[in-house]
Amino acid sequence: MLPTSAGPPATPGPAIEARGLSKRFGPILALDRLDLAVPRGSVFGLLGPNGAGKTTTIRILTGLARPTAGGASVAGVEVGLDEPRLHHRVGYLDQDPRFYSWMKGRELLELVGRLHGLAGSALHSRVGEMLTRTGLTAAGERRIGGYSGGMRQRLGIAQALIHEPEILFLDEPVSSLDPEGRRDLLELIAGMRGEATVVFSTHVLSDVERICDRVAILDRGRRVIEGPLEELLAAHARPIYRLVAAPGQEEAVAGLVERLRAAPWTTDVTAGAGLVRITVSDPNAAASGVLPMVVAAGVTLESFERARPTLEDVFLELVGPAAPLDLDGRGFVRPREVADR
Amino acid sequence: MTGFAALLRKELLEQWRTTRLPVTATVFLLVGLSSPLLARFTPEILKAVASGQFQITLPTPTAADAYDQLAKNLGQFGALIAVLLAMGSVATEKERGTAALILTKPAGRGAFLVAKLLAIATTLGIATAIAATGAWFYTLVLFEPLPVAGFTVAAILQWLALVAYAAITFLGSTLTRSSLAAAGLGVAAFIVLGILSIVPTIGRYLPTGLGAPARGLALGQPGVDVLGPTFAAVVLIAVLVGGAWLAFRRQEL
């Protein structure tokens, strides 16, 4: 950690605490009495469909917006609109980072470094390090106006990390990155576990599963659930079986689906392109009941597996089928379509 | 004023890189050079235009006419440029999201505003100094030398008036997210102040009221009261900046 001169000393307790945070935009209630407690050193995923309140939450916690009701503290500092003490401790990357187009990448990092109290050789070496780390060494001497979306995103990451923040807010940080950049950033975030607290908002479930140790799911401004990822999976993800039928058995597969839907231990059965996805309420009954039904329906299988529950299953279970989400960053899909995959 | 030095450095660099400083300085130089020329050659130009069809009798131009031409041009073109410089200074940053970038760093909102206005004032100061130097030199060549000290203080007073117009527009730029609305406020203030300046008791303490003492100083006239109008202009600028800060510190970005 780089030394921070003006910030308050570290305090015990959660890194971030939101207490009944509400935010209203005219008739729209964007946040509804949100409570959050983010432990120090965790990589915290803020998950939810568009409009869930993720960005509003981050904007309030970084002092860009004012809550209509409730309050929050970040690194022991009560958040407010004009609170430089807070920003000594915090790094922030907007989902659509904007910079001065006339500035060079290096100059932007120097400006941010100076604002954080860096100077002289420490500033110079830290800027060089961040340019290297984000793959912008050559581009650092060029004007930002000519940067691509991915380069701007990487510059945004560099400026957010330049002072080695105690708490890092990343709002949809991988949205403009190519697969390699996305992988690199996720590894970078995962590597900060234990050293810094990272709050990472996204609607890409696979990214959350990959790097987050705690998750809060928001929906329509409300916190649906919050907790360690593994606990959420254990408590809310229902067991799923996946069957892949050999091609050319559409009628037999349709018959199988009908039989499965009638079974008392299934809660949802979907099928498409030979894939049958069975969500069950009683895994033991399902374990002994599925294959006999396959045989009875005369379906020849290519594969049969009990899938590991995923965050997608938790999300669908808790948020329901109305919310659009993104399974793997390739675009929005409706849960119905997800189930059909 | 957390982060003031870093922000001022950025603002000054922006004035240069976005060519605001070079363009303003060039326009002001042209104003400074052309004012004595216009004063000197206007009678001859008019005589040439009349081409003997009718008789025009004009007094022989003097150094005072050269100064008056400079003051008039700076008061109009200069004020317009001051409005243009200030109109987008805060509004554009709020609209584009760059204000959010800076203000999620250890930078106070007061420092953010003061650095911006100071950079605009610096651009106007450099440009006014260039205009005044050019005008003084051409007045020397075409007429007679004017007192250097008095002319210098007169230029400072003219600069102060321009900063006041910039500060009014700056307040508008802080209150809205629209550069055009800010410019509208600046132009409206220019017109209103022009009308109010006719009232002697008030006019003396408005930015337009700096013109009279500036003229007296530039022409070397004795007994010029500078302090009252200068103090009033400085207080006005301070009040405008304070108002901008009070509004800005409560704004969401």
Image (cartoon, rainbow, N blue to C red):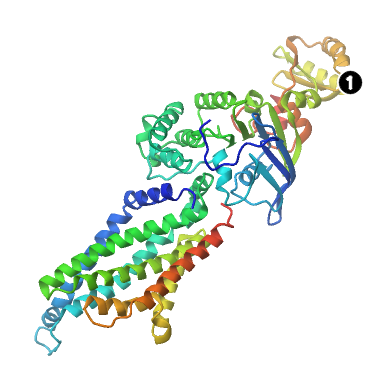
User: Between A194 and A318, which is closer to the camera in this rendering?
Assistant: A194
Q: Position of B106 compared to A301: left or right?
A: left
- Vertical comparison of B236 with A161: above or below: below
- Can residue A144 be seen here? yes
- Vertical comparison of B133 with A179: above or below: below
Q: Is label 1 in a helix, a strand or a loop? A: loop
- Which residue corresponds to the image point at 76% horizontal and 9% vertical from the top-left? A300
Residue projecting furthest to the left: B52
Q: Position of A237 compared to A179: left or right?
A: right
- Which residue corresponds to the image point at 48% horizontal and 48% vertical from the top-left? B98
Find residue A223 and report its horizontal and vertical position in percent: 75, 39
Q: Residues within 10 Å of mark 1 (few under 14, many from 20)?
A: some
Find residue A57 and report its horizontal and vertical position in percent: 66, 43
- Vertical comparison of B163 with A139: above or below: below
Find residue A43 and report its horizontal and vertical position in percent: 64, 29
Residue projecting furthest to the right: A264
- Can residue A94 be seen here? no
Among the 4 quarters of the image, the one containing residue A55: top right
- Which residue corresponds to the image point at 36% horizontal and 79% vertical from the top-left? B209
User: Between A288 and B159, which is closer to the camera in this rendering?
Assistant: B159
User: Between B178 and B166, which is closer to the camera in this rendering?
Assistant: B166
Among the 4 quarters of the image, the one containing residue B249: bottom right
Query: Which amino acid is tagged 1?
Result: Ala
Q: Chain of mark 1?
A: A
Q: Quadrant of the C terminus of chain A?
A: top right
Which residue position is annotated with label 1? A263
